[in-house]
Image: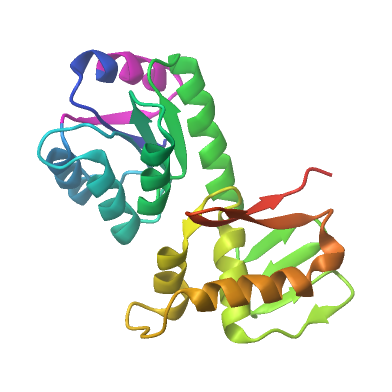
Amino acid sequence: MKHLLLADDNANIRKLLRYAMTKEGYQVYEAQDGLEAVRLMEQEPIDLAVIDIMMPGMDGFDLCEYIRTNYNIPIIMLTALDQLTDKAQGYLRGTDDYVTKPFEPEELVFRVKALFRRYHRTSSDLIRMNRIVIDRKNREVSDGHTVFIMPMKEFELLSQLAQYPGRLFSRDELIRLVWGADYEGDDHTVVVHIKRLRQRFADYAEDFAIQTVRGIGYKIEVKTQ
């Protein structure tokens, strides 16, 4: 059974979503603010978090950043505002998806299921992007015939993006995840490595694409065959 965290200061929304998610077989934990959500996550095995932006005490942006720093789980953010700046900040803090209020509970159920499928596909040591296969255990990338010789940081950057297809990573987040929190250079190195990856896999555009979201960061989209 998957365990979901619903963090929203609106009791009616929590009740509505609890009913919809419980009906789908999920175990649901509720928090009325960010601080309560943090306490729940320290006590319960949460598999996915649905969090509202506007909450007292600790808002959704700070909670999202806390979760992304300490846990490897999918995050969906809820907001009453359909503003690009809010979405940009949410993605920069580490959310995987965004739902604007008002919404139908069924839509959120679909998004939860989609995120679980995405994260489940990346739990193995092998990541497949059509012809391209990333072997994280042996640190190899191949197309079934040729093994690509890659510098370690290129491999780690590609692996990080490919683990979560469709998820947007900011440059700062990629620096922290790939180069480490003590890296003293600037984030331009991410731009350079992304350019090299695109050049290296230019012949595999039908398999996957590294996309730039201007002002935010990068994500990998795997093409449907």
Question: 187 or 60, which lies in front?
Answer: 187
- Determine the residue located farthest toward the right in the rendered image: 145
Q: Is residue 125 above or below residue 42?
A: below
The answer, for residue 137, to whether it is visible in the render is: no
Q: Quadrant of residue 3?
A: top left
Q: Quadrant of residue 145?
A: bottom right
**What segment is highlighted magenta in the picture?**
15-32
Q: Is residue 81 above or below residue 217?
A: above
Q: Residue at x 53, y 32 (%)?
A: 113
**31 in the magenta segment:** yes
Residue 164: percent from left, percent from top = 56, 54
Name the quarter where the C terminus is drawn: top right
The answer, for residue 208, to whether it is visible in the render is: yes
Residue 168: percent from left, percent from top = 51, 52
Q: Residue at x 41, y 84 (%)?
A: 185
Describe residue 9's horizontal placement relative to residue 180 as left or right: left
Question: 36 or 207, which lies in front?
Answer: 207
Describe residue 196's horizontal placement relative to residue 72 as left or right: right
